[in-house]
Amino acid sequence: MAKYIRILLAIAAWSIYGLKQASRSWNTRFDEVIRGYDIIKNDYNPCIYKKISGSSVAYFVLYVDDILHIGNDVKMLDDIKAWLSIQFFMKDMGEASYILGIKIYRDGS
């Protein structure tokens, strides 16, 4: 019985290692692609990117395999999102209502 438990633990350890490597691969690939659209990585947090064009500003925040995009120009955000959807298989989850346990409140006015 102990032999089987050791085998299962070894498989689980390799699975966890594989998941960590997958996250790193995803982040590396995203970084390569997004820089091609003149989007700059934050010097202090490697999961935050920004693009500034005139008075338009957009931020992209990576969290595991999600991307939260924030900005003051809807057209620019939509253009970048459309471009990213060509580069990656993406599913638009709509407007975020929570992120990391924080409720997002929008004032429509």
Image (tube, rainbow, N blue to C red):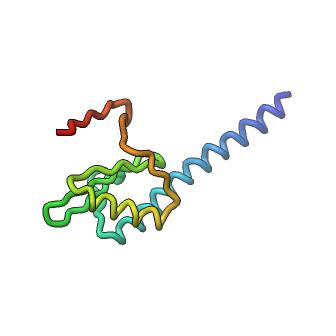
Figure check: 7 above or below 36:
above
Please name the residue shown 36% across and 48% down the image.
Answer: 68
Q: Is residue 31 left or right of residue 39?
A: right
Residue reaching furthest right?
1
Please name the residue shown 51% across and 51% down the image.
Answer: 23
* Residue 82 drawn at (x, y percent): 40, 63
Please name the residue shown 20% across and 63% down the image.
Answer: 52
Q: Is residue 11 left or right of residue 103?
A: right
* Residue 4 drawn at (x, y percent): 83, 34
Q: Is residue 107 left or right of residue 2?
A: left
Residue reaching furthest bottom?
36
In front of the other: 29 or 70: 70
Figure check: 75 above or below 44:
below
Residue 54 image-quadrant placement:
bottom left
* Residue 109 drawn at (x, y percent): 16, 39
Give the quadrant of the N terminus: top right
In front of the other: 36 or 55: 55
Residue reaching furthest front?
109
Please name the residue shown 18% across and 60% down the image.
Answer: 56
Q: Is residue 88 left or right of residue 71?
A: right
Figure check: 97 above or below 70:
above
Residue reaching furthest left?
55
**How many discs mark residues in the rendered view?**
0
Residue 57 image-quadrant placement:
bottom left
* Residue 38 drawn at (x, y percent): 29, 69
